[in-house]
Amino acid sequence: MEEHTCNGTNTTLTETPGALRRGIEVEYWVVDRDGRLVDAGPLVDGSDGIDREFIEPVLEIKTSPCDSTGQSRDELCDRIEGALDRAEATDRRLVPLATPLCPAEIRDVPSDRTRIQERIIGDSFEYIRHCAGTHIHIQQLPRRAIDQFNTLTALDPALALINSSPYFDGSPLSSGARSQLYRSMAYADMPNQGNLWPYCTSLDDWERRLQSGYAAFEEAAKGAGISRERFEASFDPETSLWTPVQIRSPFDTVEWRSPDAALPSQVIKLADDVTSILEHLENTEVRIEGTEGRVTADTIVLPEFDALMEYVQAAIRDGLRAPQVRKYLERMGFDVSSYRPITHEIAGRDEISTDEARQLRLEYADRLEEDVRT
């Protein structure tokens, strides 16, 4: 059936009876009518499914757990449209790009949790302030959470399908600038907190890693002069990680945090495609072997982790312009030709001035409004 009242590339999506529930969280920059970053606060107060992020010019719009593509499409678009109505009333716009493109002074929303992170991570915390992304929660299958975690890990190169900014501080960085900022720059000294974890062997293995990561983060906090009481008031094992794939026990979901902020239709399509692959696990064998990876009618083969990381790095560096990434994603079940990442539309400049960045923000604010309201 043809889906997406959000405009963009029309794509045939299949809704499966009894499909896994999925939830979407997407972050958008807030700008004024001249394209300058401004405080998102006036768009958040009293709004269902809309929250502040830790920096002033970003808001997060999220759905409840949804049973189908149609439900998640309708709910996400309705909530974005409500935010757009409030934005119009306060001379603001929403921008579906992963970074602000040019140098920008970005202020934090006051929070001890943020202050603690900045103390621990140091100057590299500035990179995180320049990132807006998408999180996709998918319902856990009984007794298959580890297979879901490992499969989502192997699907991480699919971040290339909706990369939306190649720029940081006015210069080209990589096709997926946000992913590089997070993984290779912000958490360079603490890769266990922000980079992709290897496959897990069991829930016990996941729990051991979770507790080990928390202990390491707590030790880093101690070294930064943060008391244990203050640290524990802001963090627990699950909330001390920013890894791309996580098992979220309180919500009975697995979460994928790698994609960039993007147009709603792009986000909905990616969430649908990833959920469909994970639904395939219910009656499917999962194996880890070799370097290629593939999804067939009765088997999901995940590449060995070292081989997977080559695909991930190419997805961040070159996106869908990397032939090996396109071929890998096709073997893993994606219709790559149906995606049009924003990053490839705006790439090619040696530098971006402040005025050019503001103009691009406004152009993609227009695109977002058209995407939702057409």
Image (cartoon, rainbow, N blue to C red):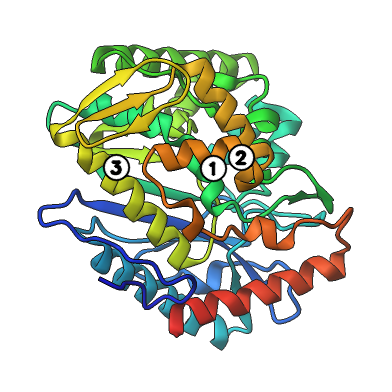
- In the image, residue 73 above or below residue 33: above
Residue 66 to residue 257: above or below? below
Q: Considering the image in quadrants, where does the C terminus appear?
A: bottom left
Please, what is the three-letter code of the amino acid marked with disc 3?
Ile
| Identity, as a three-letter code, of the amino acid under mark 2 | Pro
Residue under pointer 1: 326
Q: Position of residue 324 (x, y in %)?
A: 58, 35
* Circle 1 Cα neighbour tier, 10 Å, few/some/many (<14 / 14–19 / ≥20): many
- Res. 182 visible in picture: no
Q: Which residue corresponds to mark 2?
A: 323
User: Marks 3 and 1, how far apart in space?
Assistant: 17 Å
Q: Nearer the viewer, residue 62 or 73?
A: 73
Q: Is residue 340 above or below residue 87?
A: above
Q: Residue at x 74, y 70 (%)?
A: 360
- Residue on which disc 3 sits: 277
Counting from the top left corner in percent of width and height, residue 279 is at 21, 42
Precedes in sequence: disc 3 or disc 1 = 3
Q: Amino acid at mark 1?
A: Arg
Label 2 neighbour load within 10 Å: few <14, some 14-19, many 20+: few
| Picture residue at 19% right of the left edge, 31% below the top | 298
Indicate the quadrant containing the N terminus: top left, top right, bottom left or bottom right.
bottom left
Asked if the residue under mark 1 is in contact with the one under mark 2, i.e. CB atoms within 8 Å, the reply is yes
Q: Which residue is more in the foreground, 255 or 302?
A: 302
Q: Does residue 25 appear in the picture of this structure? A: yes
Secondary structure under tag 1 reads: helix
Please state the horizontal and vertical placement of residue 364, each as a whole percent of the image.
Answer: 64, 72
| Tag nearer the camera, 3 or 1 | 1
